[in-house]
């Protein structure tokens, strides 16, 4: 949660600050802010797709790419930090994060494939 990390921790959507390394906490907070500023593009693509506007494909390419980047960076960063022995959260919390990052990555790839197909037929 970008603006209310304590609420996110209470809901189980993120780790408590005390349970992770300070550098990881700072990285995740910065990541959340950046995601808030950039990941809206896939939402716009979805709305445009629903109303059958051809511009959805362009937003889909941008948004899908952002989602794939976000998912890949999230997984690789967390695996690297775990291997170095850094505290990045509870084992259950890390599994949840990896699950959601995988879903985001697959969603991004599917959107990119759909957008490319749509652009080739138009």
Image (cartoon, helix red, strand yellow):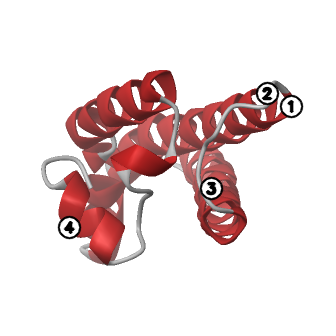
Does 42 sit left or right of 24 as displayed?
left
Q: Which residue matches tag 2? A: 80
Number of other residues with Cα within 10 Å of mark 1, as a class: few under 14, some 14 to 19, many 20 or more: few
- CB contact under 8 Å: marks 1 and 2: yes
Q: How many marks?
A: 4
Q: Are marks 4 and 3 in contact (CB under 8 Å)?
A: no
Q: Depth check: 114 or 83 in front? A: 83
Identify the image quadrant of the N terminus: bottom left
Disc 3 to disc 2, C-alpha distance: 15 Å
Picture quadrant where residue 51 is located: bottom left
C-alpha span from label 1 to label 4: 28 Å
Q: Of marks 4 and 3, which one's residue comes earlier in the chain?
A: 4
Q: Quadrant of residue 58?
A: top left
Q: Residue at x 42, y 74 (%)?
A: 12
- Residue 52 shows in this picture: no
Res. 116 image quadrant: top right
- Determine which of the numbered discs, if any, sits on residue 101 in the image: 3
> What kind of element bears circle 2?
helix
């Amino acid at each position: 949660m970008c603006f209310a990390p304590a609420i996110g921790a209470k809901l189980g959507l993120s780790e408590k600050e005390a349970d992770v390394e300070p550098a990881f906490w700072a990285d995740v907070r910065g990541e959340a802010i950046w995601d808030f500023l950039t990941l809206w593009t896939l939402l716009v693509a979805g709305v445009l797709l629903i109303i059958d506007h051809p511009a959805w494909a362009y937003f889909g390419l941008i948004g899908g790419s952002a989602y794939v980047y976000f998912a890949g960076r999230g997984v690789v960063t967390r695996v690297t930090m775990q291997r170095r022995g850094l505290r990045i959260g509870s084992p259950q919390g890390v599994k949840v994060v990896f699950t959601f990052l995988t879903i985001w990555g697959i969603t991004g790839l599917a959107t990119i494939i759909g957008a490319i197909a749509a652009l080739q037929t138009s």
